[in-house]
Image: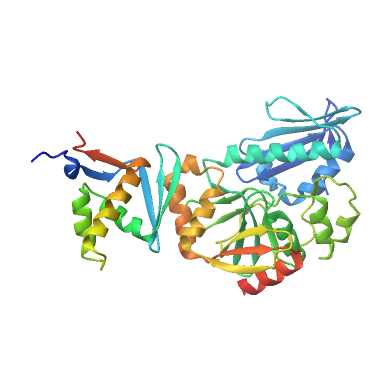
Amino acid sequence: VTRPVTEPHGLVTVGTYTALSLRYRVQASNSNLAAEFDRLYQACRAPRLADRTGRVISLELRDEGNDVQVRFGDEPALAAGDRNDLLLATMSEIDRASVSTSSGDLVLLHASAVVAGEGPVLLIGPSGAGKSTLSAALAARGWTYVGDEVIGLDESAQQVFANPKPWKLDRGSRLALAEFGCERLDRVTSDHEVLVAPDVGPAHAPGPAGTPVAIVRVAFRGGAHAAVTPMSRADGAELLADQCFNFSQWGGRALDAVASLARRVPAMHLEFGDLRSAVTVLEKALQ
Amino acid sequence: MRSDGAADVRYRACPSTHAVDLDDEVLIWDARVEQLHRLNPSAARIWHVLSSWRTTAQVTAALTAETDADASRLERDVAQCVAGFVRAGLLEQQGAG
């Protein structure tokens, strides 16, 4: 357990965390906010050695009366309406900074990832497809959570890089997850999206998380019968390309990477209308 | 007899393109306009022939050996496909007047 240290200018040092190639040191204006951040980002804590090496960007969280702000590095401070909004804004800032910092090192996929058995399964789809909710449900089932929103892939497509950040979940997702033993989620009464710590099951440490074993296109559609259908290799590669944050930057090298992955591992389309059925059919398909 | 020279035009994949084969389909990244294209198996076969300078007649001849399609229909399909590649900016041309 680390004890927060109060800095001379009134900020509490929370710790140093990683998001792929990004390393950032977090300071907060009070110990409650510091503890809240650390609870959410515990799985992203940087190894102790990393605290003293490389470039570290400072992230400041200020919650003092009506002054609720986040400042990341040299960027102008962002003001938020309340503490929940502040944490959501902070996550957006971290995601944005991790993409820009990691863009030259890794192919960055808009995906969630969980490990079942031999290696990570990439859950891919546009915003609202159900990636986060599904990965949380799978984590609650004992799959190892690898990350959400921004997942790294090396150029050879042999290694997934973990980014075990909190999930951003709306009320419907939280209620659905309550069925999976995440009872505390249905007590979060806010109608808004909230951040949820990935402590419902095991989480992978930041860094290399293994060779991917499957690509799953996730598609939530209200009322749909849960079903998994195979995708062609071209479908798989096109999906990866479409959901790649830095595809344009990497160009042909990114195309080679996603094609290499699509040739090696099965790609499948998972459509579902309820979470429990989705987990059942996906677990069966991946056996 | 007058010729408009169209038959003499030669085509080749633009250097800005980068293609990968996935089974019998092809994905092409065009770095010039930062766009990804996907070719079905028929278009993919034509694309492969255009890795070096070819007229549409040469493309048709190259494909005739590997298909049972009617020659005139194949010629028409090749012409349409090449025109589509040109419109998409995937080919460079020589002898286009």
Q: Position of residue A138 (x, y in %)?
A: 72, 64
The reply to whether residue A157 is in sight is no
Give the mark count: 0
Residue at the far left: name it.
B1
Left or right, B85 with respect to A111, comes to left
| Up/down of A259 relative to A117, above or below | above
Of B7 and A107, which appears nearest the observer?
B7
The reply to whether residue A190 is in sight is yes
Point 51% across, 59% down: residue: A236
Q: Position of residue B92 (x, y in %)?
A: 28, 40
Q: Quadrant of the C terminus of chain B?
A: top left
| Up/down of A159 relative to B10, above or below | below
Of A69 and A230, which appears nearest the observer?
A230
Q: Position of residue A240 (x, y in %)?
A: 53, 53
| Up/down of A257 relative to A24, above or below | below
Left or right, A177 with respect to A253, comes to right
**Quarter assignment of residue B62:** bottom left
Q: Position of residue A174 (x, y in %)?
A: 82, 55
Of A95 and A177, which appears nearest the observer?
A177
Point 81% across, 32% down: residue: A80
Q: Quadrant of the N terminus of chain B?
A: top left
Which colouring convention does the figure follow? rainbow
Left or right, B97 with respect to A71, comes to left
Of A261 and B50, which appears nearest the observer?
B50
Residue at the far front: name it.
B1
Point 39% across, 37% down: residue: B32
